Amino acid sequence: MTDANLSPAIKPKANQIHSPAWYRLDNAAKIYPAVKTYKWSMMFRLGVLLDEPVDPPVLEAALEETIKRFPTLAVRMRQGLFWYYLEHNPAAAPPVRPDIQNPCQRVKWRENRRFLFRVYYYNRRIACEFFHSLTDGHGGLMFLNTLTAAYLARKGHTVPPEGSILDIGAAPDPEELEDAFSRYANSKARIVLRPPKSYKIEGTGTGDYRFNLTAGIVPADKLLALSRAAGVSVTEYLSALIVDVFYRKQLRERKRQRPVTVQIPVNVRKYFPSKTMRNFTLYMIPAIDPNLGEYTFDEILSNINLYMKGNLNGKRLNAHMSTNMMFERNPIIRAAPLFLKNLVLHVVYRFVGRRHTTTVTNMGRVSVPPEMRGHVLRYEAVLGPALDNSVHCAVISYENKMVITLSNTTEENDIERDFFTRLVKLGIPVKIESNRPSGEDTHALLRQLRRGT
């Protein structure tokens, strides 16, 4: 399909989009290139499952026009004397590739035409993987939906630019390019960010930069009803459930009991209005300490709910981001060469950023225009491997399908088994999909879930 056949709503307009030559990394992005390792990729994935197989040449053409609308993604990483920075990438777009079994692999800055995100396809799936220095889940989802709409338009399906779909012919709003942390961080208060040294599970490493994915597809309305009956959000309910699973695993091990903590990303745009396509996320880290005594699930749920209520407000969030901004605003640190900054960031991450047991991120319910709904079956989200936190959870919903994906860097699947079995016992039907090799562990998990045991 040629440009002449495109819907006026998405037809590119000549000479309307201009990309800045370079960008400073936003406050959240600075730590990722400094502490990136072979084992910790700082990548995350968002995918959409369509109603028909993906046409790769059409997807490639849609990508080349869509990326022009997202100048903060059309970049490559550069290393300066004092900071890393992002420079406009003159290449048209990254290559569109067949999907791989082991997603979220480490991005190498000299590969992929130097782009810091990837686009894959497999059968009916379109998937995008992003290096976290580029954007957060909000920006990633905006890009995926805009790319999908452009793809569908080239297949003859008109999709208007609204909500999470941008007009690929329009110039970016300057606010989309901003570092919203710098704009809003003005609190005089500071928050001491010293989470306790937390419980970490041990297991047989998967090796070869491979990690296992287990996705549970559940009815969103049933889980929402369960959460509302308990007086909490879906995110809080799932976070309490996975904390309880880790807590009981630690009790069975009869080792020294450490706090069990869960890192919960929060989209700060809900509290500080911004259209930024860059990072604008902060992290809540509620915890339970088994040394205080035994916990029931209801106690864990109440603990997380009270923590979130006490911290999810504009004043606390502003103090949080202002504390984070101290590093880059410090005149001594600003004048330090990059290699010294990297050393400092490594220390900061070791004593603060790594002190959590697991992560639960909920992308929420995806809404698309009616013209697109008939072509989308579901969405998927995956958190890439972490350095020393073996299991992470990503949640995303569309219509009445909620996909809960656990990513695991160990061969054992007891966390996945216990987590999804608990959902089944609570009356939530679960359909399991996994990239694990076919074997007894996977089959046993499926059998147990079918029996609800």
Image (cartoon, rainbow, N blue to C red):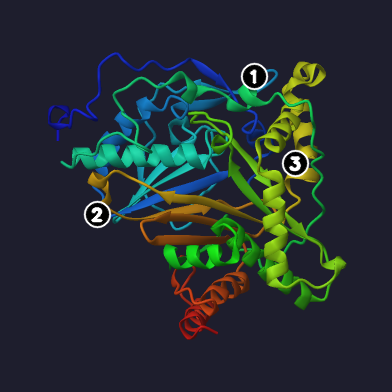
Residue 194 seen from this side: yes
What is the secondary structure assignment of the residue under circle 1? loop
User: Where does the image place residue 381, in percent across and percent down from the top left?
Assistant: 47, 52
Looking at the image, residue 433 lies above or below residue 64: below
Q: Name which residue lies at 75% across and 57% down.
A: 287
Q: Which residue is mark 2?
A: 53
Q: Name which residue lies at 26% across and 50% down.
A: 54
Q: Quadrant of the C terminus?
A: bottom right
Q: CA distance from mark 2 to mark 3?
A: 42 Å
User: Where does the image place residue 177, in percent across and percent down from the top left?
Assistant: 49, 23
Q: Which residue is mark 3?
A: 349
Task: Please indicate whether residue 400 sits to the left or right of residue 326 in the image.
Answer: left
Choose the circle earlier in sequence order: 3 or 1.
1
Choose the circle earlier in sequence order: 1 or 2.
2
User: Where does the image place residue 380, in percent across and percent down from the top left?
Assistant: 43, 54
* Observer-nearest of 112 and 135: 135
Residue 208 seen from this side: no
Crowd band around label 2 with a 10 angstrom C-alpha radius: few (<14), some (14–19), many (20+): few
The answer to whether the residues at label 1 and label 2 have Cβ atoms under 8 Å apart is no
* Observer-nearest of 273 and 143: 273
Q: Quadrant of residue 441?
A: bottom right
The answer to whether the residues at label 2 and label 3 have Cβ atoms under 8 Å apart is no
The three-letter code of the residue at mark 2 reads Pro
Q: Which mark is residue 80?
A: 1
User: Where does the image place residue 302, in percent across and percent down from the top left?
Assistant: 70, 62
